[in-house]
Image (tube, rainbow, N blue to C red):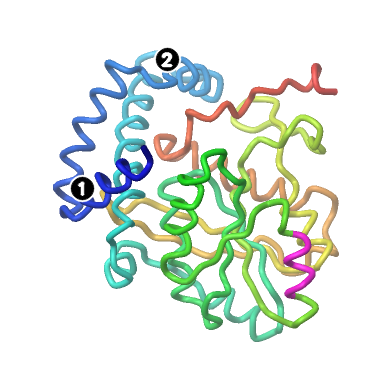
């Protein structure tokens, strides 16, 4: 079944992206109006996150989100046949030399980003780094082995690598021991598992369990932490700016880095909420129940 899916998608993505966006417009009507994919979850997440907005405003954001979600699917699949030259044209990396300067100081780097805009195209950052093949995307293994390998191949296409979450610590130890510099890209807005919750904070007007793994690793190794801030310029075009979160993690207060990251992300979402992944059950856990 997966092979049929792959052949179909491979052939489909030979079409220009502007043509595929026409399909995205069609998919939007099907997904939003007919299938109603996770619409109750999205509506609840938006309503709770923006209590100051009335139902009309919430529905407007909701529709823009679903329209972008269809674009996102098209863009990720399009990467199958997208050349290095084209993705460099579509994703502009700003301030990559911040990471390169840390490399010159013989420091590896932790990168914090989020499920915002097209995070899958951020692997193009590797093309702007002085140490080729030094970017590693950290991911959680998918249940479907074929689709898991499919996503790994997409993320590795331009020279980045992938490391499964459970292998990250030992990989970081190994690379440090052989003095190999690397940047570790972490999607840090995800919901932690119930047993691993270490921090709660108010985020988008809700009591939120926060993932602290990136900060813990940065302190363990004393690797500087940067935030990869992605913006959608127009359909099919993005900019991604490297911003320093912390140069010396060991000398920070507990949770300082994580809270700074979450505030930056919160400001981004409030500014353009349609580009965050609202279908995720981000607030599944409640503090009074878990605690």
Q: Is residue 246 above or below residue 2?
A: below
The residue lying at 26 percent from left, 49 percent from top is 235
Relative to 257, is 159 on the left or the right? left
Neighbours of disc 1 within 10 Å: few (<14), some (14-19), many (20+): some
Between 208 and 24, the residue placed more toward the observer is 24
The residue lying at 58 percent from left, 65 percent from top is 136
Q: Main secondary structure of the magenta part?
A: helix
Q: Is residue 254 above or below residue 64?
A: below
Q: Are marks 1 and 2 in contact (CB under 8 Å)?
A: no
Query: What residue is disc 1 on?
Result: 12
Circle 1 sits in a helix, a strand or a loop, which is it? Answer: helix
The residue lying at 30 percent from left, 62 percent from top is 90
Relative to 241, is 62 on the left or the right? left
Relative to 168, is 59 on the left or the right? left
Q: Is residue 262 above or below residue 99?
A: above
Tell me where residue 281 appears, x and y as whole percent. Answer: 57, 26
Identify the magenta region: 169-175
Mark closest to the chain's N terminus, 1 or 2: 1
Query: What residue is disc 2 on?
Result: 54
- Residue at the bottom extreme, as displayed: 104
Q: Is residue 246 magenta?
A: no
Between 218 and 170, the residue placed more toward the observer is 170
Circle 2 sits in a helix, a strand or a loop, which is it? Answer: loop
Give the CA separation, mark 1 to mark 2: 40 Å
Between 147 and 42, the residue placed more toward the observer is 147
Tell me where residue 149 appears, x and y as whole percent. Answer: 49, 52
Corner quadrant of residue 225:
bottom right
Tell me where residue 194 appears, x and y as whole percent. Answer: 76, 29
């Amino acid at each position: 079944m997966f092979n049929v899916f792959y052949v179909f998608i491979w052939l489909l993505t030979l079409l220009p992206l502007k043509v595929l966006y026409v399909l995205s417009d069609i998919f939007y009507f099907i997904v939003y109006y007919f299938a109603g994919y996770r619409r109750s979850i999205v509506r609840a997440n938006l309503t709770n996150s923006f209590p100051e907005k009335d139902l009309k405003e919430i529905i407007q954001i909701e529709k823009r989100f679903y329209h972008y979600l269809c674009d996102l699917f098209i863009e990720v699949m399009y990467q199958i046949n997208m050349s290095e030259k084209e993705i460099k044209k579509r994703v502009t990396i700003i301030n990559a030399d911040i990471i390169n300067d840390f490399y010159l100081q013989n420091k590896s780097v932790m990168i914090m980003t989020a499920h915002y805009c097209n995070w899958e195209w951020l692997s193009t950052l590797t093309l702007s780094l002085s140490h080729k093949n030094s970017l590693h995307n950290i991911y959680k293994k998918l249940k479907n082995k074929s689709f898991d390998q499919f996503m790994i191949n997409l993320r590795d296409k331009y020279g980045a690598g992938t490391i499964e979450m459970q292998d990250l610590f030992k990989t970081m130890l190994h690379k440090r021991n052989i003095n190999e510099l690397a940047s570790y890209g972490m999607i840090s807005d995800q919901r932690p598992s119930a047993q691993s919750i270490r921090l709660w904070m108010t985020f988008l007007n809700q009591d939120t369990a926060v993932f602290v793994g990136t900060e813990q690793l940065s302190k363990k190794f004393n690797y500087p932490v940067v935030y990869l801030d992605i913006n959608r310029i127009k359909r099919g075009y993005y900019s991604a700016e490297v911003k320093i979160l912390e140069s010396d993690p060991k000398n920070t207060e507990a949770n300082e880095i994580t809270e700074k990251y979450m505030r930056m992300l919160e400001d981004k979402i409030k500014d353009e909420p349609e580009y965050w992944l609202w279908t995720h059950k981000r607030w599944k856990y409640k503090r009074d129940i878990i605690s």
